[in-house]
Image (cartoon, rainbow, N blue to C red):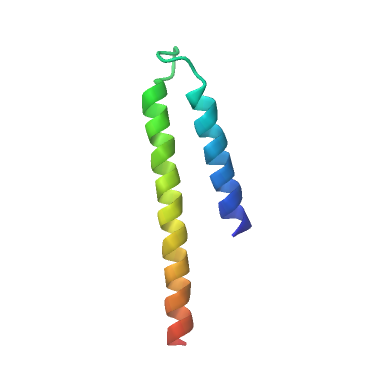
Amino acid sequence: MFVAMERQYELESLRRSLAMLRPGAPALDREEAMQLVRELQDLEEQLRSLRVGLQRLLAESG
């Protein structure tokens, strides 16, 4: 669980760094990068929820 929280912190840190870039920064489309980080954060949360659900199912079945 520590790794997941560390990863979430890293993603949030990256998101904040990207947000500080000026719009139209060369070699990086700020808006697309921000969208990608948001999607990664959402996927991390979904994976975390799936892990918890699977662990709960395993505990109930065995």
Q: Is residue 25 above or below residue 51?
A: above
* Total residue callouts: 0
Tell me the quarter of the image containing the N terminus.
Answer: bottom right
Which residue is at a point 53% across and 38% down the rendered structure image?
A: 12
Residue 39's x, y, as percent?
A: 38, 41
Residue 54's x, y, as percent?
A: 43, 71
Residue 57's x, y, as percent?
A: 42, 78
Q: Is residue 11 above or below residue 53?
A: above
Residue 59's x, y, as percent?
A: 48, 81
Q: Is residue 26 above or below residue 39?
A: above
Q: Is residue 50 above or below residue 39?
A: below
Which residue in the rendered view is the most extreme toward the bottom?
Answer: 62
Which image quadrant for residue 41?
top left
Which residue is at a point 54% across and 33% down the rendered structure image?
A: 14
Nearer the observer, 15 or 61: 15
Which residue is at a point 41% across and 28% down the rendered structure image?
A: 33
